[in-house]
Image (cartoon, rainbow, N blue to C red):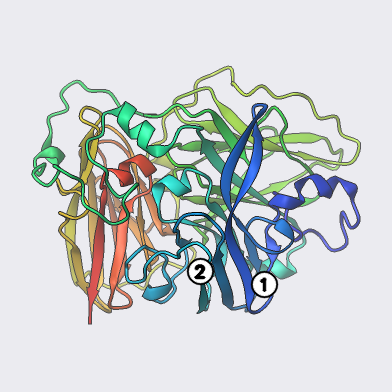
Amino acid sequence: MHSRLTRRGFLAGSAALVASAAFRPALAAPASRLAATTRTLDIGGKAATVFGIEAGNGRQGLVLEPGEPFRLTLENRLAEETLIHWHGQIPPNEQDGVPDMPLPKLKPGESRDYDFTPLAGTHWMHAHVPAQEMQLLAAPLIVRSADDQTADRQEVVLFLHDFTFRPLDEILDSLGADGAGYGTHGMGTMSGMSGMSGMSGMDHGAMEMDLNDIDFDAYLANDRTLDDPEVVPVERGGRVLLRIVNASAATVFWLDTGALDAELVAVDGHQVKPVRGRRFGAAMAQRLDLLVDLPAAGGAFPILALREGARERTGIVLATPGATVEKIASLGEETAAPFGFEQEARLEALSPLAERPADDGRMVMLGGSMEPYLWTIDGRVWGDHAPITAKRGQRFEIGLHNMSMMGHPMHLHGHAFQVVGINGKRFSGAVRDTVYVPPMAMMTIAVDAGEAARWMFHCHHMPHMATGMMTEFAVTA
């Protein structure tokens, strides 16, 4: 997905852009429109009808220029009800996009207006209905800063998905999940689950980590597999900002820049002190901004996303004029390593929260198991949850203690928080909206409680969320 935001005049009129135009976020105009709609992809030679979020000219997603308001109308062109969450943004609570918190989903044909001041950075938007997000009802939401506008670099968006032809209900049945859950019946509670309060304290014994609980049919980068990857034209000796969004439902990816050295300069849209390397991890819903410099000699440079604990991979290719692009196998030669907290421990925010002691806090236990397939917060599922309560303006710390054998990317709505502790060791970490808590690990986050409202706090692994791994951050005045 190659945005129009390239070096001045570079690639103007290039025919190479035509093939990828459908997945370049559209530049917004005041009072613009977005539509939740259907589209058809070719996945492994098989037609797949999926969802999408379409702006002007059939493009997926949106780019806002510095100072531009988030002012648009969202239209539901689907045959079912839906609602879109603006992930990473901090809108008024009524515009956050969670069904019935407080506004209902849009019926087919209905529209709703949005108007708020957006946060700059690499963000995204998606349905807050797990079954729909797994049908690719998601798209990039890029808000450029003044520095982005003046920087002499090309911007390339890499939007990652895992994809299955199976519906979520079928997946949950195959995993042994009990009850309908959030994924199929909106905000309803799980049937028969309210008495599972002991799950978070389960004895794991000699259990091993469960890295991947679902094998998907395909892993996509900008809607394409490595059978036919997007080849992005780039300039010899140029600089590229890779805006990477892990929009997958249940897959942690390692981003591998291959022959190119990279600098990680932002996570979840918030700048960090640069970290150099060639492989960086991103859990579900997390974003990475990577800077790479291309050699003057040019060439073709794959940017690959490697599935954690497996050999599957996807990606795009950056190619200078005349470069030969070789075939890339969809299976790597080696199994990618598990993703832990080592990367998180190296990150330091450029603009951390103001230093102040915590006014209040709470330890939250993340629990669950593969048999039965059930995932909980404090031993409870949504509908039987115990809200995390704070007062507006408080500095509130949440300890996230993962007592399960799977990692959980925990996303807090309506706020940005700072990671301030890993396994009890304090540090001044990254500012984020989604933090990955590895198996049997503990992360501590600090947040300044914002608008007095009910804000969703949940795991961004869709089947975990669908079985009820959600609570709320309830802020009072």
The three-letter code of the residue at mark 2 reads Glu
User: Residue 271: x, y in percent?
Assistant: 53, 61
Quarter of the image where one finds residue 453: bottom left
Residue 251: assigned label: none
Question: Residue at the spot x=59%, y=21% of the render?
Answer: 332
Question: Residue at the spot x=52%, y=76% of the render?
Answer: 113
Question: Between 28 and 394, which is closer to the camera in this rendering?
Answer: 28
Question: Between 170 and 425, which is closer to the camera in this rendering?
Answer: 170
Marks 2/1 in contact by CB < 8 Å: the verdict is no
Q: Which residue lies furthest to the bottom in this view?
A: 477
Quarter of the image where one finds residue 7: bottom right
Q: What element carries label 2?
A: loop
Residue 110: assigned label: 2
User: Residue 55: x, y in percent?
Assistant: 66, 63
User: Residue 349: x, y in percent?
Assistant: 46, 61
Question: Residue at the spot x=45%, y=37% of the render?
Answer: 252
Residue 236 can be seen in this image:
no
Q: Is mark 1 on a helix, strand or loop?
A: loop
- In-image side of 35 versus 103 (left or right): right
Earlier residue among tags 2 and 1: 1
Q: Residue furthest top?
A: 333
Q: Name the residue that disc number 1 marks.
A: 65
CA distance separating discs 2 and 1: 28 Å
Residue 319 can be seen in this image:
yes
Q: In this view, does 311 lie above or below 78?
A: above
Judge depth for marks 2 and 1 and give the one in front. 2
Residues packed near mark 2 inside 10 Å, few (<14), some (14 to 19) or many (20 plus) = some
The three-letter code of the residue at mark 1 reads Glu
Question: Between 417 and 228, which is closer to the camera in this rendering?
Answer: 228
Residues packed near mark 1 inside 10 Å, few (<14), some (14 to 19) or many (20 plus) = some
Quadrant for the C terminus in the image: bottom left
Q: Is residue 304 above or below residue 110?
A: above
